[in-house]
Image (cartoon, rainbow, N blue to C red):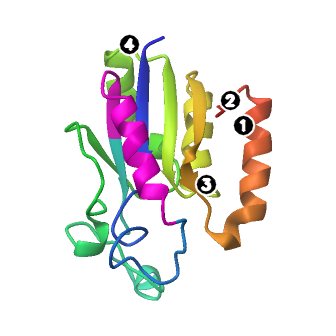
Amino acid sequence: MNKALLVIDVQRVFIGEGHHKLFDYREDLLSDINGIIEDNKDNTVIYIYNYMKRNFINKLAPFHMYENTFESEPAEALNIISDYKFVKYEGNAFSNPDLDKLLKEKGIDTVEVIGLDGGACVPMTALGAAEKGYKVIVNSKGTDTFKLRANRKRKLEKKLKELGAEFK
């Protein structure tokens, strides 16, 4: 198995000191994420960052994470052990074709996903990986779900299980 760990949207706006009050992820999540990153130091670790496009609709959002802003930066305490970084503007990290290109170049056949949010970008990226033919592992210890997305999380997890994703 040649595995990559995808660390999804662990950014200041969502988690850590100074995060937006809308997000209420469990306090030990960042520590758990860092432990999983450390456990994967011999694998390819890739950081995925979600940015908003600067447009009128996004100006109305309750929070902002435009590229090159404080809010869009990695969470302050995030363990960064590689230079692999990809940007996305929607939920599925595979919407950036360069991610799949790198995984193929490195001969990756399995992706493990952690990060935020368990009812949005994490399962959407996991679905994207499954559709691209990768074996998928969703590491539940390294993710959490914003309360308003709990029902969506259950539906996406059901679909992932049907596609053969592993949950640990």
Task: Give the residue pinned by disc 3.
Answer: 118
| Residue 127 visible at all | yes
Task: Give the residue pinned by disc 4.
Answer: 107
How far apart, in angstroms, are the residues tagged by discs 1 and 4? 23 Å
Residue 53 against residue 44 in the figure, above or below: below
Task: Give the residue pinned by disc 1.
Answer: 160
Q: Secondary structure at mark 4?
A: loop
Q: Quadrant of residue 10?
A: bottom left
Q: Which contiguous range is marked in magenta?
A: 27-46
| Disc 1 crowd, CA 10 A, few/some/many (<14, 14-19, 20+) | many
Task: Give the residue pinned by disc 2.
Answer: 165
Contact between labelled residues 1 and 3, with CB atoms less than 8 Å apart: no
How far apart, in angstroms, are the residues tagged by discs 4 and 2? 19 Å
In the rendered structure, which amino acid carries the disc numbered 3?
Gly
Which of pointers 3 and 1 lies earlier in the amino acid sequence? 3
The residue lying at 23 percent from left, 74 percent from top is: 70
How far apart, in angstroms, are the residues tagged by discs 1 and 2? 5 Å
In the rendered structure, which amino acid carries the disc numbered 4?
Gly
Which of pointers 4 and 2 lies earlier in the amino acid sequence? 4
The residue lying at 46 percent from left, 88 percent from top is: 60
| Disc 3 crowd, CA 10 A, few/some/many (<14, 14-19, 20+) | many
Q: Secondary structure at mark 3?
A: loop
Q: Quadrant of residue 56?
A: bottom left
The residue lying at 25 percent from left, 66 percent from top is: 67
Which of pointers 3 and 2 lies earlier in the amino acid sequence? 3
Queried whether the magenta region covers residue 35, the answer comes back as yes
The residue lying at 49 percent from left, 66 percent from top is: 27
In-front residue for pair 54/145? 145
Task: Give the label, 4 or 2, closer to the camera.
Answer: 2
Which of pointers 1 and 4 lies earlier in the amino acid sequence? 4
